[in-house]
Amino acid sequence: KAGVTQTPRYLIKTRGQQVTLSCSPISGHRSVSWYQQTPGQGLQFLFEYFSETQRNKGNFPGRFSGRQFSNSRSEMNVSTLELGDSALYLCASTRTGQNTEAFFGQGTRLTVV
Amino acid sequence: DQQVKQNSPSLSVQEGRISILNCDYTNSMFDYFLWYKKYPAEGPTFLISISSIKDKNEDGRFTVFLNKSAKHLSLHIVPSQPGDSAVYFCAASLSGNTPLVFGKGTRLSVIA
């Protein structure tokens, strides 16, 4: 069974640009969560989507947004990129939205220059 | 304010010995805890979890202990192997229904 797939794996963007990251959950999983990992900060929760609805949101500015499609694939968008947005963005999926065993993708490494 | 803390950024252990990774939490409402292992350039991999109704859960070489009164959990790996060298994250949730709150991780190095 295929795991969580995130594309692209690496991305370099310039300050002020916007970026869209994609996440395809494990087949049959309906919940997708996004996390940001930066050195020294661990993983910080961005938002969670379940059946196309945002169910939880972390403490990030409005420049960070996301959506989920009917096939459970999810995208996150960051507008007006700042240098501090450079991070590894991780997506996790669960079948029911219960975080008793969330499966993570390999992440997208975003570098803002 | 960090709700989940892993106070040791790194740990070195000899192959064959026990590795003990510690995690403290401040929110007494947390009742579900997970450990993830992460290699560089890969996403975290689920290792083992424990619900607050238990104080111990075992899976092969991995055992997690939960001390609710101390708001402390630990992951024991025995025997440690070089392939266990990775960053280990502790995470907590309320009944699995809320987003996972992660610690900052502990880098484990198992020396052959």
Image (cartoon, helix red, strand yellow):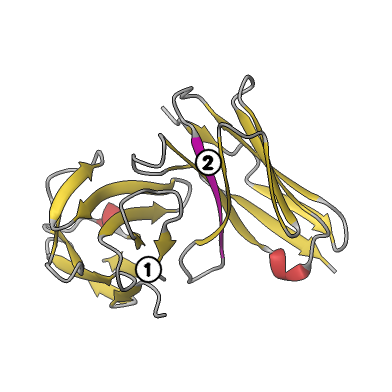
Q: Is residue A77 left or right of residue B26?
A: left
* Disc sitting over residue A107 in the figure: 1
Residue B95, located in which quarter of the rendered image? top left
Q: Which quadrant of the figure contains the C terminus of chain A?
A: bottom left
Which residue is at 67% across, 34% downward?
A: B55
Q: Amino acid at mark 1?
A: Gly
SS for tag 1?
Answer: loop
Numbered marks: total: 2
Residue B29, located in which quarter of the rendered image? top left
Q: Is residue A38 left or right of residue A19?
A: right
Q: Chain of mark 1?
A: A
Q: Main secondary structure of the magenta part?
A: strand
Count neighbours of disc 1 (C-alpha within 10 A) and say few if under 14, some if 14 to 19, many if 20 or more: many
SS for tag 2?
Answer: strand
Q: Which x, y percent locates residue B49?
A: 56, 48
Which residue is at 33% across, 70% downward?
A: A108
Magenta segment, which residues? B32-38
Residue A109 visible in the picture? yes
Q: Amino acid at mark 2?
A: Phe
Q: Chain of mark 2?
A: B
* Disc sitting over residue B33 in the figure: 2
Q: Is residue A76 left or right of residue B26?
A: left
Q: Which x, y percent locates residue B59?
A: 69, 56
Determine whether B62 is above or below A103 in the image. above
